[in-house]
Image (cartoon, rainbow, N blue to C red):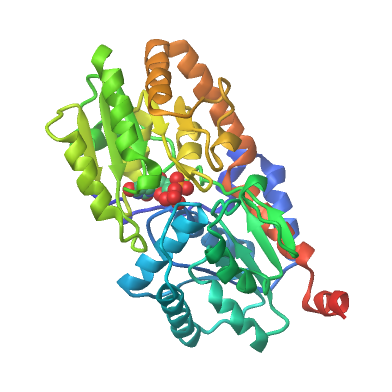
Amino acid sequence: MSSTANRHMPSLAEYEPIVGRSAIEDLRALVTRLAGQRVVMVNSTRAGGGVAEILSRMVPLLNELGLRVRWEVIEGSEPFFAVTKKLHNALHGKPEVITPEVFELFLEVGRRNAARLAIDDEVVFIHDPQPITLVEKRQAHPASRWIWRCHLDVSRPNRAVWSFLEPFILKFDAAVYSSAAFAQQIPMRQMLIAPSIDPLSEKNRELTPEEIAAVLHQLGVPQDRPIVTQVSRFDDLKDPLGVIDAFLRVRRSMKCQLVLAGGSASDDPEAEDVLNRVRERAKGNPDIHLLMLPPDSHLEINALQRASAVIVQKSLKEGFGLTVSEALWKARPVVASAVGGIPLQVKHRYSGLLVHSVEGAASAIKQLLNNADYAKRLGENGREHVRQNFLLTRHLQDYLLMVLTLGSAEDVVYLKG
Ligand code: UDP
């Protein structure tokens, strides 16, 4: 079941009833100051994971606003993405063995992509470390402005990896992080811009109970008992085994079922191994549904989130954690680890429950399953918090303002000169 075929791409005017007319007018006013500029977004995958999710929604709207925005994806072999995954983990502080060959392959693939991609746009956004070496190309276009949009928490990185990347990072005009807590001490302009979700996308739009029931039926998830769900790539840092362990504790005393819905991103080679371990842990338990979904399963994820009594995000490390905003926007009660950007979204006992362990997660899930009024209140607060802070229109505004503050090419020369 795929939801891509007849996906409706909403126009800006359709956001007005959700965010108010002035938010849309502000965007139109801002963009006149950047009229005609060409912007390119570069990342490492077109589908799977939060960055691709955001770009797929943001690029069409920026074009509608009048900027000329394209989206390029770097190409790499399987070993390259094994390397970038290692670097990703190491930047998150996970112990990894990084050999000189790892860095060499990273540079080699970077050179090949630099030769393949024409980048002569006025504004260049490089998302995350994978395409970072493309910044070498800016010498050919001194008037361009380059932004490193880092979606990771690099506050406690593996030092060798950071030292390797830092000379590239310093060549950008600005580094943008999702949270103040993610940044590094580096002598350059650093900015904070939280990511966002699109309330009108197939993943987040309102669904009727009939639509939800039809999807759950097709996925083989019965609605006869409460559903506890985690939506995440099968990645150890998302702790799917911990989710199962927490669920098993809850299940001892309560009738409920667990859905682990995930897929893999094309830039994530570890998923298969993680999934095998998850299958082993869940083996034979009729209350645990493991759903391997194709990357365009937006409607399916939407319906699963809406059908859930509790949504869990038990990550060990996290970037921003878009799945949390997705759940809160649906006014679902959330139990989530206090890592990465999650505490920006979940205020403990106000818009969800923050936890630090398997036991803590189990007890929070039980509390919410047992107390429907409290769960409902947390969910409603969460929805309002997302409306105010984490919707796409706010994100577009922040990006436009940032580009404006970086100034025009002449300003940059003047400031430097
Ligand atoms: N997602 C998806 N299919 C999956 C798993 C995740 O579409 O099988 C989506 C999820 O709904 C969210 C994004 O991928 O929009 C994950 O973003 P997040 O920031 O939570 O984590 P990341 O994968 O970027 O670490």
Q: Is residue 269 visible?
A: yes
* Image coordinates for residue 64, horizontal then vertical, percent: 58, 62
Residue nearest the observer in this picture, 262 or 224: 262
Residue 98, placed above or below residue 232: below
Q: Is residue 413 left or right of residue 34?
A: right
Residue nearest the observer in this picture, 416 or 89: 89
Q: How many circles with numbers are drawn on the protein?
A: 0
Residue 374, placed above or below residue 51: above
Quadrant for the C terminus, please.
bottom right
Residue drawn 48% across and 68% down? 130
Q: Is residue 215 left or right of residue 307?
A: left
Residue 80, placed above or below residue 404: below
Residue drawn 58% across and 54% down? 154
* Image coordinates for residue 193, horizontal then vertical, percent: 65, 51
* Image coordinates for residue 192, horizontal then vertical, percent: 68, 51
Residue 20, placed above or below residue 414: above
* Image coordinates for residue 336, horizontal then vertical, percent: 46, 31
Q: Is residue 255 visible?
A: no
Residue drawn 41% across and 35% down? 314
Residue drawn 84% across and 77% down? 416
